[in-house]
Image (cartoon, helix red, strand yellow):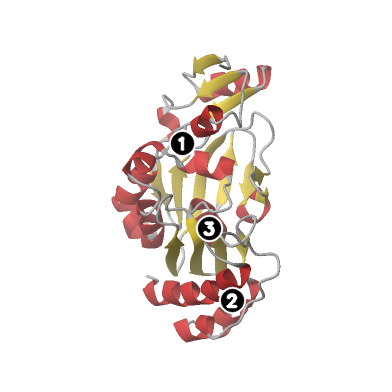
Amino acid sequence: MSTFSYLQASSLAEAAKAAAASEAKIIAGGQSLLGAIKLGLAAPEALVDLSALAELKDIRRDGATLSIGALCTHATVAASAEVQQAIPALAELAGQIGDRQVRNRGTLGGSLANNDPAACYPAAVLGLGATVHTDRRSIAADDFFTGLFETALQPGEIIRSVSFPLPEKAGWQKFKQPASRFSIVGVFVAKTSGGVRVAVTGAGPGVFRASPLEAALNQHWSPAAAQGLSLRAEGLNSDLHGSAEYRAALIPVLAGRAVAAAR
């Protein structure tokens, strides 16, 4: 059995100091990290628990931006009247993550820091062109996700909040794995002031933007414009849940449904 030290931080500064002082792992809801520890896939020397930090649990709208604290649970985001009014698709996405236990323990920041290739939140963050704010800096969504379970976060860097620009319209569609409820393919579509953004999760080794779909929807915002495309399967995942070709065919179908549901 592995052993480790444990600290429940009373402030963000204390958490950052503890994380920098050792080979510590930051823990929020623990839905990813605790499972990895139980399976022997992670063996941290120390855990720094952020769960007591009320400053990371705020949801507020400031003009054309919605800010959500890193410790907000999926259930909190889904139930938030502020989120439902500002970006309905984001509330819908949060309400479809995992099961009740996961939604009531898992957090926005934890999901983004873990960057599971089939996680839902990365698609919303990338699709909306959000900005991830840490205890050190602000990172644009296009620069944040760097690979399989990899992000631009430096060791010990802690996510504080995420700011989402309010879109004109946005929609989310997910074809889920029935047991885990992770996305076999998930597509987030947003019509923004800077153009259409389409982010795909579950289909590849990490979340990515679908440029052909963005180009088609910028020309004509309609379900038919998305569903009429054929995407290449090269580089997409192929596993027992679906081949790369299956996922390639599913992406434009879900994108069209997301456009139809967008509001």
| Residue beneath disc 1 | 31
Q: Residues within 10 Å of mark 3 (few under 14, many from 20)?
A: many
Where does the image place residue 141, in percent across and percent down from the top left?
61, 53
> Of 259 and 117, which appears nearest the observer?
117
> Of 126 and 3, which appears nearest the observer?
3
| Residue beneath disc 3 | 123
Q: Which one is closest to the eye, mark 2 or mark 1? A: 1
Q: Is residue 156 left or right of residue 93?
A: right
Q: Quadrant of residue 201?
A: bottom right
Under mark 3, the amino acid is Ala
Residue occupying the point 66% across, 72% down = 233
Circle 1/circle 3 CB separation < 8 Å: no
Question: Gap in Å between the C-alphas at discs 1 and 3?
Answer: 19 Å
Vertical placement of 135 versus 67: above or below? Answer: above
Vertical placement of 138 versus 170: above or below? Answer: above
Vertical placement of 155 versus 3: above or below? Answer: below
| Residue beneath disc 2 | 213
Residue occupying the point 61% across, 73% down = 245
